[in-house]
Amino acid sequence: MPQVTLVEAVNMALTRAMSEDAGVVVLGEDVGVDGGVFRATLGLLERFGPQRVIDTPLAEQLITGMAIGMAVEGLKPVAEIQFSGFAYICIDQVLNHAGRMRHRTQGRLSCPMVLRTPCGAGIHPPEHHSESPDAMFAHVPGIRVVYPSSPRRAYGLLLAAIRDPDPVVFLEPTRLYRLFKEEVDDDAKALTLDTCFTLREGSDITLVAWGAMVHDTLQAAQRLEQEGVFAEVIDVATLRPLDMDTILASVAKTGRCVIVTEAARSGSFAAEIAANLAEHGLLSLFAPIARVAAYDVVVPLSRLENVYLPDTERILAAVRKCLAFG
Amino acid sequence: MAIVGRFEIESRQYLDLHGRALEPVPAAAREPQLLVGLYRQMVLARSFDQKMLALQRTGQLGTFASGVGKEALDIGVGSAMQRDDVLLPTYRETTLQLARGVSMLELLLYWGGDERGSDFAVPRGDFPVCITIAAHCCHAVGVAYAIKLRQQARVAVCVLGDGGTSKGEFHEALNGAGTWRLPLVFVVANNQWAISVPRKVQSAAATLAQKGIAAGIPSIQVDGNDLIAVREVALEAMARARSGGGPTLVEALTYRLSDHTTADDATRYRNADEVAEAWQREPIGRLRNYLLELGAWNKAEEEALLKSCNEQVQAAAQAYLDHPAPSPAQMFDHLHAALPAAWSAQREAAMARKTADAAGHAG
C-alpha cells in the first residue's frame, strides 16, 4: 500500500472516480495543465482529456453554477474553488440552487455535485487564503458538508461524496495537505458519510474536532495519556448532517467534553455541537462544555497566524480546566 | 493607430405596429395554419395570466409575476424549441412554460405556494423558474456543456430580463458559453423595467445585445412583440446551436404592461402615457390584424377562441382550488434522496402538527 499525503489521496480518489464513471468531470481554475494550485488534480488532464478536466475562466459563480447545471443534466461534476476565501461568492449558488433543486422539483431534478475547496489557516499564505467557512456551509439545508482530516478519510469520504446523489461541499484542510503520510489502499471503497469517526477511545474526557484541528487534538490526547488521562477523540468528518449519536454516547461515558475548531468562536460549528450536548446530554456532564476556537477576529496575516490558531497547548489548558471542575 | 475591434447589431422586425408585413417576410409568415396555432396559444396564455391576477386579487393565489405583453416573445421562443431541449426560465416566463407543456394546474400550484407545481409531468428536464436574478445563466452553461460533452443535438435556452444583464453571473455565463462554443441561446426579454428601474438607468450600452459581442457570441436584437420575427430569430439561433455553431444572444424588445408583481404598484414610478403608448405595440392585436388581413382568421373564430380559453382557465382554476393541501412531508421528503437520520425527529414533529396548519391557497 502506498504512503500518501492528504492531497495525494484526494488525487487518488478523483482518479478512481473518473475511471469508474464517465459522467464524473472535474472543473475549476487551473485544474487542467497546472494540476491545480495544490496539485490535487495532477495528471487528470493527461489521463481523461480536456472535455472532462476543464480549465474554466476565472469565475467562481460560473464554476459553481455550471456544476449545478451539469449535475441536473446528469453528469457528476467535481468543482474546485481554489481557496475557501473565494468560495463565499458561491454560497448563493449553493444555498439558493444546489441545496434546493431536488426539493423544489419534488425529486424531478437532482444535483449530484461536489464543491471542493481547500480550507483553513496555517500555511502562511496571503490574505483571503486562510478562511474557515465550515459553519456557513453547514447552515445550508439540502447539502452535505464533509471535512476529512487524514489521507485515508480524504480518499474514502471524497469517493462517497462523488457517489452521493446530492450536493456535497467538501472542505480540505490545507494545513494537512502535506503534513503527514498514511497508507491508503486505492481499493475504490468509500467511507460512510453522516457519521463521526472515533479515532481514539478513552474514558476520562471527549475531545471533538474536525479538519486540521483533529491533528492537534490527537497530539493533545497523546500528551494526556502520558499523564494518565485517557481522552476519547472524535473526528466529526460530516458536519451536515451531524451525527450527534456518536458524540452523545461518548459524553455519556466520559462526562466531559471539549470541542475544538479553528474557526472564529462566535457562531462557529462548535456552538451547534455544544447546544445539542446541552439539550440532549446535560445530565451526563460533570463539567461545563468547553470550546477551543480561534478568536473573534479577522484571520490575521501570516505573522500572527500561529497566535490566532488554537494549538495543542490551548486544547490541553481547556482539558485541564474541564477535568478540574467540581 | 489601429482599429482592433468593430461590431454591429442587427435588429429584426417583420410586422409593423398595425400588423402589416414588412418585406421580405420569412417563410413562416406564409404559413397561416402555423401562425393561427401560435396565435391561439398567445390568447390562451393571456387569459390564463388574467385568471392568475384575479385569483391573487381575491386571495386565492400568492404573489404572481404577470407576463402580459410578452406573449409573442414566449410563444415565439417556445415554438422554436424542440421537446428535449432544456428551458431555464425566470418567474416571468409562465407563457413560455405553457408552450413547453407545463400544465396550468402545475403553474397554479407553484404560484399558490405548493412545491408540486415544479414537478412538471412534461417537460421533465426543464428547470424550475429562477428567482435570484441571472443565477440560472450559469446553470445553462453547465447544461449546455453536458449536452456538448455527450454530442447531443439539443439546446439549452436561458431567458432573463433586462435587469439580469447587469449581473455578474450573466457575464460569467456569456463568457463561458463563448469560450466553449456551447449549444446555448440566451434570450434577454428586455421589457424596459426592472421593478422601478428603467432600461436607461440599467446600462449605458446602446443595446443589451451587444453585451454578447464582448464574449465572442453572435448577438441580435429583435422586436419581441412580433411573433414572426421572434420565431425566426429563435429558429436561427437554435439551428446554429444544434449544428455546433455555438451560442447566440437574442435581445427581444418588449414592454412590461403589468406591475412587476402583484406586490408592486408601477404607478409609483412610471406614467400612464408611457404604458398607454406601449399598449399600442402589444403583440396579440398585431398578429390578429395580420391574420385577419391574410384572411386566415375571422370574428367568429375569435369569439369561439375567447370562449374556449375562458373555459380552459376556469377548469384549471377549479382543479387548483380543489387540489388537496400539501402534506408537511413535502418539506422533508425531497431534501435529499433519502432523509438523513439526523432530521427524522423533525419530520415526525412536523407531521404531528394539524394539517389545518397548512395555509390556504392565499399563501
Image (cartoon, rainbow, N blue to C red):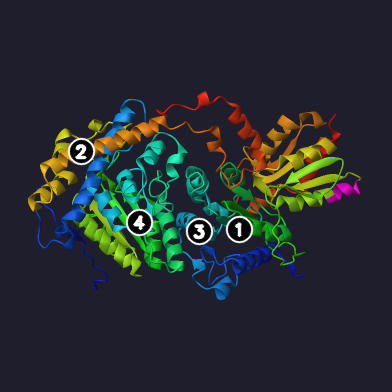
* Label 2 Cα crowd, 10 Å radius (few <14 / some 14-19 / many 20+): some
Q: Which residues are magenta?
A: A222-227
Split into 4 quadrants, where in the image is the C terminus of chain A? top right
Type of amino acid under label 1: Ile
Chain letter for the residue marked with disc 2 in the picture: B
Q: Are dots 3 and 1 in contact, CB under 8 Å?
A: no
Q: Which residue is mark 3?
A: A74
Is B20 situated left or right of A242 in this image? left
Q: Nearer the viewer, mark 3 or mark 1?
A: 3
Inter-mark Cα distance, 2 to 4: 30 Å
Q: Position of residue B120 (x, y in %)?
A: 42, 46
Secondary structure found at label 1: helix
Chain letter for the residue marked with disc 3 in the picture: A
Give a yes or no on whether discs 1 and 4 share a subunit: no
Q: Are dots 4 and 3 in contact, CB under 8 Å?
A: no
Q: Are dots 3 and 2 in contact, CB under 8 Å?
A: no
The magenta stretch spans residue B361: no
Inter-mark Cα distance, 3 to 2: 42 Å
Q: Nearer the viewer, mark 2 or mark 1?
A: 2
Inter-mark Cα distance, 1 to 4: 28 Å
Disc on the earlier residue, 3 or 1: 3
Inter-mark Cα distance, 3 to 1: 13 Å
Split into 4 quadrants, where in the image is the N terminus of chain A? bottom right
Q: Which residue is mark 2?
A: B306
Q: Which residue is mark 1?
A: A162
Q: Residue at x 13, y 48 (%)?
A: B297
Q: Position of residue A212 (x, y in %)?
A: 70, 53
| A285, B259: nearer the viewer | B259
Secondary structure found at label 3: loop
